[in-house]
Amino acid sequence: MAAFAVTVTSSSQLQGGEYLESLSSERNFLLALSSSGDASLTNLHFPLSQPETVTLNTRSWASHLCLDSAGPYAAFGTSSTHPLRVYSIKNDELSRTPNAILHSQMLSEPAGTKPVSSAVYGISRAPLASPWGSSPQILVSGWFDGHVRCHDLRSSSRIKCAGGNAGEPAPLRPVLTMKDPLQFESFYSVSCGGGSSSHIAAGSARHSVVSFWDTMAGVFMRLETIALLSIMSSLKVQGYMAPHKADPLYMTLDLASIRELILSYLKPKAWMD
């Protein structure tokens, strides 16, 4: 029988005013994450047994369960100075402390002295045809700062920063960071795959924008709402919209010319270590 996995992000109110923020399942295990950071792992073959619970002690948004890796793990996206953490799973139990903390800073960026608070809203396994191979130890995440980051849990590139808790591992740097040059909003969901199994898609709330990256070809594409396309059809440019249709200082382009102009600005924005 083929393996089955699903991740659901929703808001269902629990007792005490908490919300069930995210569900992730694989095989016979269900990972649940509340809005306040209570994470529980349940073996569905024994649904009446007490689930293993870990408290993250922070506002939490997303979960990702991976049992295919040589070392099974659960990843959690939260709001904190280290918003993306990975917990190992041994003997069907979540570890009490993270075995990996995934940082936002690339190797090429200047070292910071103090971590900045951020949030991770979406987590996914990397596309199967990515440059790093099909390993389940590669995670793709959508961040509050409008970046999509790829982390390889096998990497040894780590960062030394102030503010870490005693006994926690040094934060792991991303192997690839991507940003939409025309998008300045947070990414609330990410998904990977596509026809060539090499695409990463990230969605934001404002204007219903979905951004796509092809990790193999470096091709950047952008989908926007039909409403935005209708605005494009009446766009008058000498760089910006004309105040009056008959203004001689501006030139009206047909839709094909507008598309060519906009695509000239949609160049890949990705940084890889």
Image: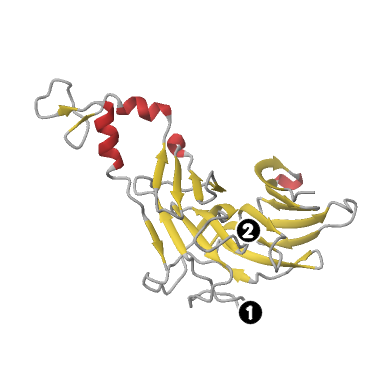
The residue lying at 36 percent from left, 52 percent from top is 268
The residue lying at 43 percent from left, 51 percent from top is 146
| Residue 253 numbered mark, or none | none
The residue lying at 52 percent from left, 47 percent from top is 196
In the rendered image, which quarter is residue 40 located in? bottom right
Vertical placement of residue 267 versus 118, above or below: above
In the rendered image, which quarter is residue 91 located in? bottom right
Residue furthest left in the image: 248
Mark 2, residue position: 76
Label 2 is placed on what type of residue?
A: Phe
Asked if the residue under mark 2 is in contact with the one under mark 1, i.e. CB atoms within 8 Å, the reply is no
Please name whichever residue, 223 or 216, is drawn nearer the observer in this view of the structure. 216
Q: CA distance from mark 1 to mark 2?
A: 19 Å
Mark 1 vs 2, N-terminal side: 2
Judging from the image, the colouring scheme is secondary structure
- Residue 216 image position (x, y, % from top left): 45, 55
- Residue 180 image position (x, y, % from top left): 39, 49
Mark 1, residue position: 167
Please name whichever residue, 112 or 106, is drawn nearer the observer in this view of the structure. 106
Q: Nearer the viewer, mark 1 or mark 2?
A: 2
The residue lying at 69 percent from left, 59 percent from top is 66
- Residue 6 image position (x, y, % from top left): 69, 46
Vertical placement of residue 105 versus 148, above or below: below
